Amino acid sequence: MKKTLTMASLSLFLIAMVAAPVSIAQEATPTKSDAQAMKVISKMIDAMGGRKALESLKDTTVSGTMEMISMGMEGGLTLYSLRPNLMRIDIEIMGMTITQAFDGEMAWMFNPQTGANEEMTEQQSEEFKRQAMGDMYLLDPEKYGIVYVSKGQEKIEGKDYDIIEQIHPDGWTATMWVDGSTHLTYKVKAMGTDPMSGGEVETETFTTDYKKVGNVMMAYTMTTYQEGEEFMTMTITDVKVNTGLEASFFKMDG
């Protein structure tokens, strides 16, 4: 049965879709990454194009479409990012445009109900801040207190995948399945927030259809499942890099 959304709840629903999953309590948080996990991370960086190529991406503009299976809705989106931690998403859906952004200090959004920009809640801001860091968590995990832990391997449909956990200082955790042959991320699983009920829900995101943009590999299709049911598919149609985005573009009054 398809769910329905009011205009007021749609913005919060979209935040939950694009922001990182909520934190998960850890019984004992490791304080140092293990050697096997960092070996996987090193291979991932190389497979994505190498440290030099990734660090050369000062800003990116990603455009695409999204289909929310459970909601029976389709829309378009453009995601802008500027190093080290600025992010903006413009979503076109139901005949309106919703903007969500993190300016390096504060997360804000355009509220279609009031027709004005407003600050996000503290939790939403933390999630956007985490998401805005992008690949910095791979390139310099110690700087941000990120710990990677190896969880062995798993064979899926005849292919071997390395499993590693990414653990943040506040306990936020994501489990990553990395293709043992391509060394690119295949799946990320974590507990997220159901925007309709507010409760926790298991979320899995599959990243596929990798293509090279300049010297960097990027996934062009991302399919998300909630509690095992297909929830949303995002398909990238265009990627631009180093277009000269300015920090003011990410400000609430920018």
Image (cartoon, rainbow, N blue to C red):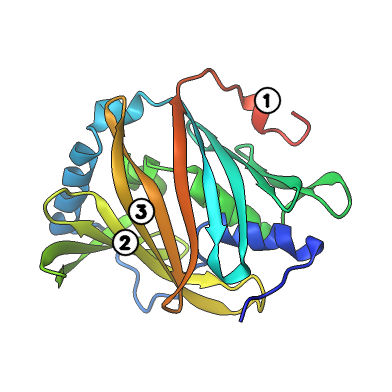
* Lower position in the chain sequence, tag 1 or tag 3: 3
> Residue 80: image x %, image y %?
55, 34
The image position of residue 142, as x and y in percent, is: 32, 46
Task: Identify the residue position indicated by label 2 in the image.
Answer: 187
Q: Which mark is residue 144?
A: none
Relative depth, front residue between 118 and 12: 12
Q: Quadrant of the N terminus?
A: bottom right
Could you say which is closer to the camera, residue 193 or residue 225? Answer: 225
Q: Nearer the viewer, residue 239 or 47?
A: 239
Rendered location of residue 183, percent (x, y) = 18, 49
Single out the mark in the foreground, 1 or 2: 2
Q: Are marks 1 and 2 in contact (CB under 8 Å)?
A: no
**For residue 146, which numbered disc appears in the image?**
3
For label 1, the SS is helix
Q: CA distance from mark 2 to mark 3?
A: 19 Å
Amino acid type, mark 1: Ser
Q: Secondary structure at mark 3?
A: loop
Compared with residue 10, is residue 219 higher up or lower down, i.e. above or below? above
Q: Which mark is residue 248?
A: 1
Tell me which residue sits at (72%, 61%) in the image.
10
Determine whether 207 is above or below 81 in the image: below
Quadrant in the picture for residue 167: bottom left
Residue pictured at 50% horizontal, 51% vertical: 130
21 with respect to 198 (left or right)? left
Q: Earlier in the sequence, mark 1 or mark 2?
A: 2
Task: Give the Cα separation between the discs numbered 1 and 3.
Answer: 29 Å
**Residue type highlighted by circle 3:** Ile
Residue 24 visible in the shown view: no
At label 2, the amino acid type is Lys
